[in-house]
Image (spheres, helix red, strand yellow):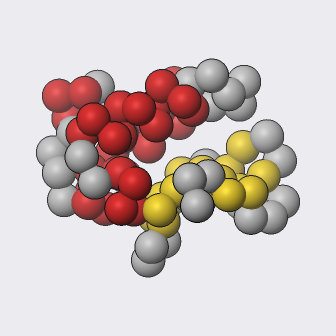
């Protein structure tokens, strides 16, 4: 699964990590990206490029996504911001 529409959600957190996914909420849906698809800085950057095309993906979401990806996969992504 690259991106899955899981369910409509009213969560206030827009980006968070689950046991196996990084989850984004936006556009009325939850998107779950498997952690193994975010295993390198290049992979995270490609996802940032994809997500930045979404109308609901804000600058705040971008920073949170990069921070959470880095924490979840144990890679310092600070230099990408």
Q: Which residue is located at x 28 percent, y 54 percent?
A: 39
Q: Is residue 4 visible?
A: yes
Looking at the image, the residue that sits furthest to the bottom is 19
Of 33 and 76, which appears nearest the observer? 33
At which x and y percent is residue 69? 35, 51
The C terminus: image quadrant: top left
Q: Please give left or right for residue 75 compared with residue 46 in the image.
A: left
At which x and y percent is residue 13? 60, 55
Of 58 and 22, which appears nearest the observer? 22
From the viewer's perspective, is residue 37 above or below residue 49?
below
Residue 46, located in which quarter of the rendered image?
A: top left
Residue 78, located in which quarter of the rendered image?
A: top left
At which x and y percent is residue 17? 45, 64
From the viewer's perspective, is residue 11 above or below residue 60?
below
From the viewer's perspective, is residue 80 above or below residue 26?
above
From the viewer's perspective, is residue 6 above or below residue 68?
below
The N terminus: image quadrant: bottom right
Q: Which residue is located at x 44 percent, y 43 percent?
A: 65
Q: Which residue is located at x 46 percent, y 37 percent?
A: 47
Q: Please give left or right for residue 45 compared with residue 75 in the image.
A: right
Looking at the image, the residue that sits furthest to the front is 1
Q: Which residue is located at x 35 percent, y 40 percent?
A: 44
Q: Is residue 9 visible?
A: no
Of 50 and 57, which appears nearest the observer? 50
Q: Please give left or right for residue 27 compared with residue 78 in the image.
A: right
């Amino acid at each position: 699964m690259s991106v899955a529409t899981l369910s409509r959600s009213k969560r206030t957190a827009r980006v968070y990590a689950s046991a196996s996914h990084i989850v984004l909420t936006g556009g009325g849906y939850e998107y779950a990206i498997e952690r193994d698809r975010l295993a390198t800085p290049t992979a995270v950057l490609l996802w940032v490029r994809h997500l930045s095309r979404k109308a609901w993906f804000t600058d705040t979401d971008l920073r949170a996504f990069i921070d959470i990806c880095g924490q979840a996969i144990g890679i310092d992504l600070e230099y990408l911001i």
